[in-house]
Amino acid sequence: MASMLSAGLRSDSNIEVHKYYGGTVIITAFLALVLQAFLHKYGRWSELIDLPLLVTVYFGVSRRNTSTGLLLGAAIGILQDALSFDNPIGLYGIAKTLVGYVSSSIGGRIDTEHPLSRFGLIFLLFHFHQVVFAVTQRVLLNHSAPFFTLRLLLDSVITSTVGVALFALLDRLRRSA
Amino acid sequence: MLNVYSRHRSFALLICVVFAQVLLLAFQIKRDRDVPLIRYWAAELVTPVGRAGTWTSSKIRGVWTGYIDLHGARIENKQLQAEVDQLRLRNFELEAQAKESQRLQLLLDFRQAHPEAPMLAAQVIGASADPTSHTLFINRGEHDRIRRDMAVITPDGIVGKVVEVFSNDTAQVLLIDDKDSGVGALFADTRTHGVVKGTGDPLPIMDYVVNDEKVHPGEVILTSGEDRIFPKGLPVGVVKDASPGTPFQVIHVQPAVHLDRIEDVLVLLTRQDVALKSTEVPVDPNAQTAAPVAAPASASPDSKSTGASPASKPAQPSAPPQEPR
């Protein structure tokens, strides 16, 4: 157990910070938003996957910079709010800001390269995102949003599965050292 | 120390960003107002890409469905083509059956109209391999009491006579246009006698008509009964054309029956005269006839001139007529 923890947890000096070509983060985040809006046209199955969340998590854990992570999450969340019909601006923004911050913080502490750890990370952050989203709605908007449902569980599993594949693809965008 | 500072700095930034968004939310809720500018910018940013994506996907889909993914269409086309071929074949079969049933119905009507004359329906099963010999094979033979020199007719008129009977249910019929054929005949109007002889050509001639006799195209020719084969008064054909000759006129006869497209016939099992009425025996409209065939045999004064001896008559079986096979 101790060896597993020691293998999973790394000191800051051992953590590799990945770099990307200029514009990669912005273009990828933009494409995720466009795809999320675009795929919605072709059926409600696209609601099972939260692509903006995946991009927020990926660049958060890869760049391991909490400031850029939270700012990226805020930008993606605000744009997602703006593209929705009835969400007030800031609802997704707050949730994804926190997800960006947390994922950047986690990315600096544990190994996020293994598919299983990625699956678990996405799964947890998905529900963290939902909890923040629900709390914001309940506290600020006085809406009764659920913290957990079976549908959310299914969404989280599918999003995590897609996320593992997507992360592997996005790894190819890394700039070699 | 630097790390701690960095962590606090990012945490402070987090607080600021979240707080700013909470304020933004509160502003929207308190004033019940949206932030249209942000929505406008977001839409302006995303929609062109979405539009381009939609255009591209529709083009790709069009190319795929219109050009590449035609495998299913090809298979479906083959299946439909095979189905069309089968249906076409089936249609031909049904058409042939309908025509056959019409022909058989005509034969049946004819036979029922003449219950006094025993006759047997037969199907043409072949023809002569010799182009100069105009004969047919029918599916009736000795077992069906068919004998030589029995008359073979259709409701339209005479066809020929039985010249050979085989034991295996087959008989050979000599058509009236064969060069060895001769039928005692007379003109329906003038009652002038002659002999319709085959020439080997499609049109037989009526011989032994003197040049003084006025013969008009379209004149109806009937059997005279003098040959002791065909009962008197059956349609032979109509005059096609007539010209003076030596010593007799050359009269070409258009047979009442299309001899080259016969499929079902009736074999008269007796020499008894068959009274044909004009309404019962329609002449084939395709034949170049000018008038319907008519002439009850009993009305002719020549009816006694046949002079056939009982010994020379064909067999007259007492068995009822049989259906065609």
Image (cartoon, rainbow, N blue to C red):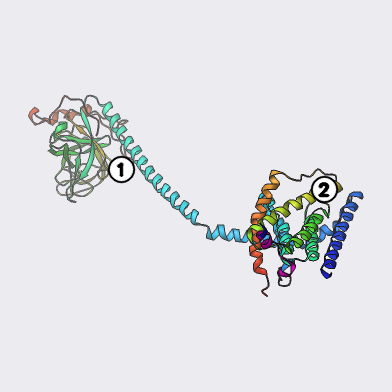
Q: Residue furthest right?
A: B31
Disc 1 element = loop
Give, as a three-letter code, the residue at label 2.
Gln
Residue A102 at x, y percent in the picture: 77, 59
Disc 2 element = helix
- Circle 1 packing at 10 Å, graded few (<14), some (14-19), many (20+), is some
Give, as a three-letter code, the residue at label 1.
Ala
Which callout, 2 or 1, points to the residue nearer the camera? 2
- Above or below: residue B80 compared with residue B98: below
- Above or below: residue B175 compared with residue B313: below
Separation of residues labelled 2 and 1 (CA atoms): 97 Å
Residue positioned 80% across, 60% down in the render? A74
Residue positioned 42% across, 47% down in the render? B83
Magenta range: A3-20
Q: Which mark is residue B287?
A: 1
Residue positioned 16% across, 33% down in the render? B225
Residue B182 at x, y percent in the picture: 15, 41
Q: Is residue B279 visible?
A: yes
Residue B188 at x, y percent in the picture: 24, 35
- Above or below: residue A20 compared with residue B18: below
The chain that hosts pointer 1 is B
The number of numbered badges drawn on the structure is 2
> Going by the image, does B296 lie left or right of B311?
right
- Above or below: residue A174 compared with residue B47: below
Residue A120 placement: quadrant: bottom right
Q: Which mark is residue A137?
A: 2
> Going by the image, does A9 lie left or right of B319?
right
